Amino acid sequence: MLETTSHNPLTAGLSHTLLPEPCSIVIFGGAGDLSRRKLVPALYNLMLDGLLPAGIAIVGFARTDLDDARFRQLARAGIEKHSRRPLEEPAWSAFEKRLFFVRGPFGEASSYADLAKRLEAIEPGCGVPGNRIFYLSVPPSAMGTCVEGLRGAGLVRAGAARPFSRIIVEKPIGRDLASAQALNDGLAASFREDQIFRIDHYLGKETVQNLLVMRFANAIFEPLWNHKYVDHVQITVAEEEGVGTRAGYYEEAGALRDMVQNHILQILCLTAMEPPWTLSADVVRDHKLEVLSCLRSISGSDALRSVVRAQYGSGVHRGVEVPGYRREPNVRPDSVTETYVAIEAYIDNWRWAGVPFFLRTGKRMPRRASEIAVQFKGVPPILFNADAASPLEANVLALRIQPDEGISLRVATKLPGPKVRIFPVKMDFRYGTTFGEQSPEAYERLLLDVMAGDATLFMRRDAVEASWRWVTNILEAWEDAATRWLPEYSAGTWGPLEAEKLIQSPLRNWRTP
Ligand code: BG6
């Protein structure tokens, strides 16, 4: 594997040593939404940045009736609409030559034989030495078939063999612990764990990666990062949009499966993990797994006390009346799928003993905003904090993941004037202001890492199953409760009253990010 020899802080990433290798990327579901909106634009931007390896072929693979020319048109439209940077003709004409399409249903052996033949034909001209990445952008029910098809056609090379075969799997990886295990078993029958890249696109976001840099490249935070100084932590992933056109999927998922099992628990791991002694993939992932292993299980009646779920009702979004969840297209009128969830969680280890982690996510909230906020304990009740009736506001370190990426620290200051009056101010760092240019999209970073064989930002099997184990307890408690109605929050608000009660104490409130 290629290694960079000198340390360049601008190109060094979290794992920073591996370089992307020439390869073919086969996108299963290449005509689909994810491919057009995210994957193809991400690859195009990587090319603009000169980060793609010189040898590259991008092959859409699906049953859709397309050929190379029409796939290229589709890709172009996707870039025009969704790319971080605009389409430039000379760059596009170089890029499109690397795009191909193979048509075939996933359930038929002949599709994979066609795919194999086509890859053999195009790779020499594209400078690809036979390395292949298979990106499964397909529903979980189709994954087993795709893996079987690849294996049957001899398209999977074993373990560390060269040229390499790698597989990328999109979420949802199962819908509970048992189905996740079955899916992972299916993958393991054909691929070794280090060939499998389970994507959680939140891990590719700049600010999520910055969490480790913040914690471990600065001297001032880590000494405070524990139960002695931290009062509680809030992790919020708020979305403005409703369920949109995805009700078919979402009705079966809900916020706990869709957002908590993966994105929020991954953020929690990075926030709470012990310092890894190296940034190699397995060491980082071992340390993340420890957090999941220490998460206090929430089951039975605890789930009804420590977890709030709710559904958005009708309301106003950007000045327009919008329907409640149960009235969205393709949603059952008596649906009890949660569009909001808030959880009081505890990590029972030495560092975090007794510190609540409040997690929340919801659709149709007032705005899109994701952040991690660490609220520190108050100062002793003497001097400026002596008045019990109006305690000082605590210090809060907030890491904004999106959209306005940055970091802010709330500190108490003296209001100018003859009296001593305390006023909380915010010290603010904004990515946009400091670094100017737009951060790369999560998929850019993640695709590059797969080409380099770096799994640091991908979920290992044990972590996926550990988070499902925790989430499945809650799901089972909900199932036992057999609720026929969920609390509602009006579209465009920050969630139900029940969630306020979950957190409320004199010094604790949900933040308004
Ligand atoms: C996806 C969920 O994983 O993440 C969606 O399935 C959600 O429901 C999306 O909207 C949010 O991602 P982002 O990057 O827009 O915050």
Image: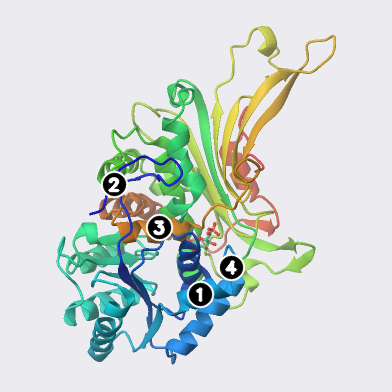
| Residue at 64% from the left image edge and 7% from the top image edge | 382
The numbered mark at residue 243 is 4
- Say what amino acid the circle numbered 3 marks: Leu
Badge 1 element: helix
- Say what amino acid the circle numbered 4 marks: Val
Badge 4 element: loop
Q: Nearer the viewer, mark 4 or mark 1?
A: 1
Q: Quadrant of the N terminus?
A: bottom left
Specify whether 346 is left or right of 493.
Answer: left
Sequence-wise, which precedes: disc 4 or disc 3? 4
- Say what amino acid the circle numbered 1 marks: Arg
Q: Which residue is mark 1?
A: 36
Q: Is residue 394 above or below residue 268?
A: above
Sequence-wise, which precedes: disc 3 or disc 1? 1
Q: Nearer the viewer, residue 21 or 474?
A: 21
Specify whether 190 is left or right of 325.
Answer: left
Q: Are marks 4 and 1 in contact (CB under 8 Å)?
A: no
Estimate the spatial distance between the alpha carbons at disc 4 and disc 3, rounded to whole Å: 26 Å
